[in-house]
Structures are given as C-alpha cells and as structure tokens.
Amino acid sequence: AFYEDMLLDDSYFPSLNSYFKTAIGSSAAGCARTGGGIFSPVEHSQSREEHMKQAIAIRHIHFEDLGSLEPVLEARGYKVRYIDAATEELAAIDPLGPDLMVVLGAPIGAMDEAVYPFLWFELELVRQRLQARRPIIGICLGAQIIARLLGGRVAPMGVKEIGFGALSLTEEGRNSALALLGNVPVLHWHGDQFEIPAGASRLAFTDICPNQAFALGQDRKSTRLNSSHITI
C-alpha cells in the first residue's frame, strides 16, 4: 500500500487491506466444459501467463530481493523475473520490453563501476529505460542509479544512517503513495545520498539524510527504502 501505483494502472494501492483481499486468478481443478469443447486447466494457466504483465527486478545480492513487494506485484497481475546483475548478460536485456523494471539495492555505490564493471551495463540499461519514459522503481542502490542518470549528484553523507527510524514526509510525500509511511519506523542502512534530480519532487527525509525518496513525472518512482523491511 506504500508504492504509488502509476505503474500498476491505478493511482494508488488504496489500502493494506486491498492487498490481502486481492485474489490471484487460479485454474479450476480438473477440466471444465466450454461451448466448443474441453477446457484444459493447463491451457488456461498458459493463457493466463501469456496475458500477465511482465516485471523484471535487477538483483545484486540474492537475499536482497523484492521482499513483501513481490506478492503485491503478483496480485496486481505481474509475472516477476529476477536478473542477477553480476552474473547475467545485462547487455542482452531489452530495456523497453518489460512493463515494469525494479532496480534493487546492494552494499555498493552508484559510482562504483570501476570496481564493479557490471555497473557499466546496468547504467546503460537504466538510462535507456529512463529515456523511453518506461515505468521504473529504484530501491536503495537503484534509487541512487536513477538519480545519477537524471543528473543528481550521488555522494557520501559523511555519516552512516543505520537502524530503524521514522520518515518525515514533504507535502508531496503526504499526497503520494508514501503517505502511509509517515512516522512509521523503517530500516535505514546507507552512507550515500542522492540529490533530487531537476524537475523531480522530494517525498521524504530524515534528520540525517535530507533526501530519502523522490518521484519524477507520471511514470518514474524512486525510493531509497529497503522493501525487505517495509510492510507493503
């Protein structure tokens, strides 16, 4: 309920309850007769899968996945596929093909491509996605990558922000899908921060880090928050 649903056909996830009430379509057991013949549950499952929206999640560490965001996306009709950035061929991925791209976190920096060469390919993949104005979410490292590519500076804060702490929301944040996170303790674990890119709206901040989340346009969302530690 905390992610703006400009990516998912509605304006917002209406409430936490709406997630739990959302039913994912399932195949009926056995075969059911339809007007022209036998309806196979296998065929039904394949047909449903073909019509599901596609989401790719670029992952850097195996346990830093979509967390509780994954069942929300699945409930909204997305089939999720993970791409492991350090081991898979990022240059072979169509940056415009998926309906949604999510760039996940990692204990590295958005400027570390000299140390981690796969970042060159990841930066190019995200750059093309942004240029095409296709829906994208950035979490943690992903937020920093998006900010960098949109012209925002990414640099160390000079202090680590580690532990649980409440977010403060800007006016734009209170009117966004992050509204339900206001004053909710969430886990912070980073030492870098991004500048808010030109034209973007700052959504959240803390006493230590003035820029915690931003949004740009109708089809781009970026947040530093670690979804594994946020109830969605």
Image (cartoon, rainbow, N blue to C red):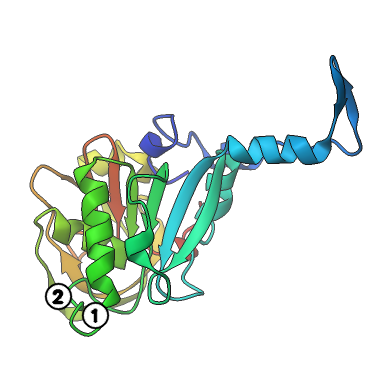
Q: Position of residue 104 (x, y in %)?
A: 38, 64
Residue 205 visible in the displayed image:
no
Q: Position of residue 67 (x, y in %)?
A: 52, 62
The three-letter amino acid code for the residue at tag 2 is: Met
Q: Residue furthest bottom?
A: 115
Q: Position of residue 94 (x, y in %)?
A: 36, 51
Q: Dot 2: within a 10 Å radius of its alpha carbon, few (fewer than 14), some, or many (20 or more) residues?
A: some
Residue in the picture at 20% in, 73% down: 192
Residue located beneath label 2 in the image: 157
Instruction: Judge whether 220 appears above or below 91 on screen.
Output: above
Of residues 54 and 153, the one nearer the viewer is: 54
Task: Tell me, for residue 160, which label it has, or none.
Answer: 1
Q: How many marks?
A: 2
Residue in the picture at 23% in, 41% down: 132
Q: Position of residue 8 (x, y in %)?
A: 44, 36
Task: Tell me, for residue 73, which label it has, or none.
Answer: none
Q: Secondary structure at mark 2?
A: strand
Of residues 140 and 60, the one nearer the viewer is: 60
State left or right for residue 19 relative to residue 215.
right
The three-letter amino acid code for the residue at tag 1 is: Lys
Q: Secondary structure at mark 1?
A: strand
2 and 1 marks in contact (CB < 8 Å): yes
State left or right for residue 36 relative to residue 162.
right
Residue in the picture at 29% in, 36% down: 175
Of residues 71 and 181, the one nearer the viewer is: 71
Q: Quadrant of residue 193?
A: bottom left
Instruction: Judge whether 113 appears above or below 5 on screen.
Output: below
